[in-house]
Amino acid sequence: MLRFLLRRSLGALAILLLISAVTFFLFYAIPRNPALLACGKGVCTQEQLAVVEHNLGIDKPIPQQYWEYMVGIFAGREFPAGSCPAPCLGFSFRDNRPVLDTILDRLPTTLSLAAGGVVVFLVLGLGFGMVAAWRRGTLTDRTVSSTSLVLSSAQIYFLGPLALALLVYNNQILSQPGYFPITEGPGAWFAGLLLPWLVLSTIFTAQYTRLSRAALIEQLQEDHVRTARAKGMGRRTVFFRYAWRGSLIPIVTVLGIDMGSLIGGAMITEQTFALPGLGRLAVDSVTQSNLPMLMGVMLFAALMIVVFNIIVDACYALIDPRVRLA
Amino acid sequence: MTGTTSHNERAGAKEPMSKRTAHRRRTAGVALALAGALVLSACSGGGGGGEPEGEDSAGPEQSAAITFGDEAASTGPAEEVPGATPGGTVNVLQETAPDHLDPAQVYVSHESNITRLLHRGLTAVRLDNEGNYSVLGDLATDAGQVSDEGRTWTYTLKEDIYFNDGSPITSADIRHSVERLFADFITQGPSYLQRWLANEPETYRELLPDGPYGGEHLPDSVLETPDERTVIFHFEQPQNDLPYALSMPGYAVVSAEGDTQEAYDQEPMTSGPYQIEEFRPGRSMTLTRNEYWEAASDPARNAYPDRYEITFGHTREDTTARLMADNGENQTTVTFNNGLDAGQGPAVVEDPQYQDRLVDGYQPYVWSLAINQQTVTDRRIREAIALAVPLNGVRAAYGGALGGEYAGSLISPLLPGREDDYDPFGKVANPQGDIAGARALLEEADAVGYELNYVHHTAPEDQQAAIAVENALEEAGFDVNRSEVPPETYYDTIGVVDSGFDIYRSSWGADWLSGSTVVPPQYDGRQIADGASNYAHLDDEHVNSEIDRILLIEDPDQAATEWFELSKYVVEDAVASVPVIYYRQTMLHGSLIGGAVFNDDVGTIDMQRLYVIQDGS
């Protein structure tokens, strides 16, 4: 297992290097000059602009900038406006502080949103999927399937404001969404995130219901399941011991990608509920042309997806020993 | 809705060569008599309907007068807001977090609105209970003592003024604050004072290239600080607007001892009633009381709340929905910058249940279409453009009536000296544009099919407005080539003299309530240069000479009228710019917020007068 993880980690490192290079060159090749932002409207002369570009470190060739960026991740960097200790994912020209500081400031919000949302949609999605597969062909199955089809086509930017209006503003059933650190009060943390969790998980629940149902039905038709049943094993035992475990492989695959994406930033959910997470940070960075911040968020999101893919691979090995042997 | 009665009690106006106090009521007669059709009656009466009489007078339909305050007027504490009680927490919903906390880097409104709670300068503008505006001495004992026909201004600092570490504010701090404006890392704030001191608009930094950090200082011929409490500015040209300029948040005091240069932008010392307890960029800011602030020294800030909890990332939609709900913490919530969203706004302004929680007024900006005088040289073609531009199409892109009013002039309704019904091309009356008239002019000039290069930026509303303008111009017979550039490079793009563009949008806002911050920066032909703000590239001898003449006028009433007259020349005779809309802002606040009125000088809710309506009050 250790060798397996080591191999996957090295592969992930190569992927991250590739992503960083592509992202860096893409961002810095586009015709937007961060120095103009730092310079202000009509204030800078060309000489001033040159000073600002130098201070920002963007007066050097792009390959050299990339090299310094990568060195900064391991050794840190110094800027006239402040220092950026390792691991330095860049320095934001807008607010004069290391990109990683802002990312770490936003991460708890996104982690809380993602973790709570995952718990909700996994419990509900897998549960509904099992019920539908168990009662395949019945009214219950058809109801669950059609409902999940409808809900999976709904969008957060529709459900969010609707839920806010119905549950918060008009009827005050739930608290105003917001992020409060769990360390400062678990109750406020839970109450503030409950609605975002519910809305975020609605669509995912529907998708996981469908996925879980399909995977279970497929597993129930496998030879080893039929053999177990033929040998007289109870339906419930076969369902949970063989079929359900086998159905987890595609679910874990998708879950890994979804977890990575969610921790990279649930942009629309965070925007809808004004939650200060990584998703909103990414959106703000785009609208403000804050390229170092955007680059940092992108790299962080890529890192999360790669990390969760490694975890998924490890889970494969746990679920299906054939993966480890291969 | 109403006209205004302006008081003009000028004392000492006949003493141009003598040192005289500026406390005379240099009433600018801000004729804020606004178009009667405007739906402006919803100016706040304060939260919870508990606002005393007099609060409504601060609304934009009312008249206001600007005076320069003498020592008595500049002595704190600030006039009490009727019914106000101290204490409580005000929550503020903002869309964009400040990028800068160093006051010298503050210019844009979402930053300056917060800065006004934190920092103090030599002067400040105060809106009183009767709706009058005064430039008062803030750190200084009065709005300034002027001599030498406006070339020398003397300020005496108050005695009980401190930074939030308890250190006293002295003239050394004022000198340092001025000198650091010349350092190359100060790039975002206003530059009026620096340019006036250097008497060089574009190369002012050469006066003190390293700021105070290289051991050099401004000479006494420019800035004198003979003792701990005296500050004397010397200018080569008369600067009659100095008290206004010094009230800008960008000219607030910075501690000489506590200055950490670039790092000051993260952790500034404050001199106002509040200090920053915590700032999480892009997320939130908590302001708590600065225990060293003395209310007795501050005539401009009431500072009733104990605390401000400011959160960022709130869209207009989110802000409007929360304030409509008016539940829980939303009852003690305001916004400084988020106007009603275009979707719910129209219903909100019509709904009686929100009327006493609305604050409405003009912003200082005027949306205009600049016409490049160096490329579009035929006046008939420029007039054809002016006739064709559809005001209604542009306004619709900015949220309809909530976003702005049709504009006839380049001078905002907030400014004095205006003719309210000025509409030279009949565009306010017929906002769809005069396509037939424009086409007739083109035919007369034998220019049907005239090619126009139009540049705008990529903000959604600007794109939508540009399409409306393009369609109208094409219908009139122009051949329009439309280009888009990102917002951050937009002003640099249109600021290039040989850019090759013919028409472009400009949103110019007065920095204080004077035409001197509108006409000269945009239409002085001697300032045409790459990066300058004469976007129309207008170099007209009449305009240039009139600018020089009006800048010397000491009577603000007369100057205001003359600025407006000159702006009429720019619109009608030079046809250098087409006024399109005056920006408006309508905001909602929570029911337990008191003292909420629109402040014309700030262009939003007056944060200095706010209070939390306490239980039982």
Image (cartoon, rainbow, N blue to C red):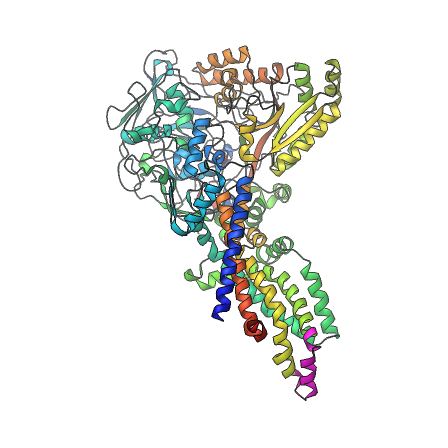
Q: Is residue B565 visible?
A: yes
* Residue displayed at 73% across by 75% down: A136
Is residue A296 shown in magenta?
A: no
Q: Nearer the viewer, residue B126 or A75?
A: A75
Q: Is residue A179 visible?
A: no
Q: How many marks?
A: 0
Is residue A234 shown in magenta?
A: yes
* Horizontal arrangement in the rendering, residue B507 relative to residue A89 (left or right): right
Q: Position of residue B234 (x, y in %)?
A: 33, 18
Residue B564 position by quadrant: top right
Q: Position of residue A28 (x, y in %)?
A: 52, 41
* Horizontal arrangement in the rendering, residue B262 relative to residue A135 (left or right): left
Residue at far bottom of view: A232
Q: Position of residue B21 (x, y in %)?
A: 34, 19
Q: Position of residue A161 (x, y in %)?
A: 61, 53
Instruction: Tell me the quadrant of the picture where the N terminus of chain B can be found.
Output: top right
* Residue displayed at 53% across by 59% down: A306
Magenta extent = A218-235
Residue B347, placed above or below residue B15: below
* Residue displayed at 67% across by 81% down: A224
* Horizontal arrangement in the rendering, residue B482 relative to residue B5 (left or right): right
Q: Nearer the viewer, residue B363 or B190?
A: B190
Residue B193, placed above or below residue B594: above
State whether the magenta stretch is mostly helix, strand or loop.
helix
Residue A200, placed above or below residue A84: below
Q: Nearer the viewer, residue A118 or A80?
A: A80
Residue at far left of view: B227
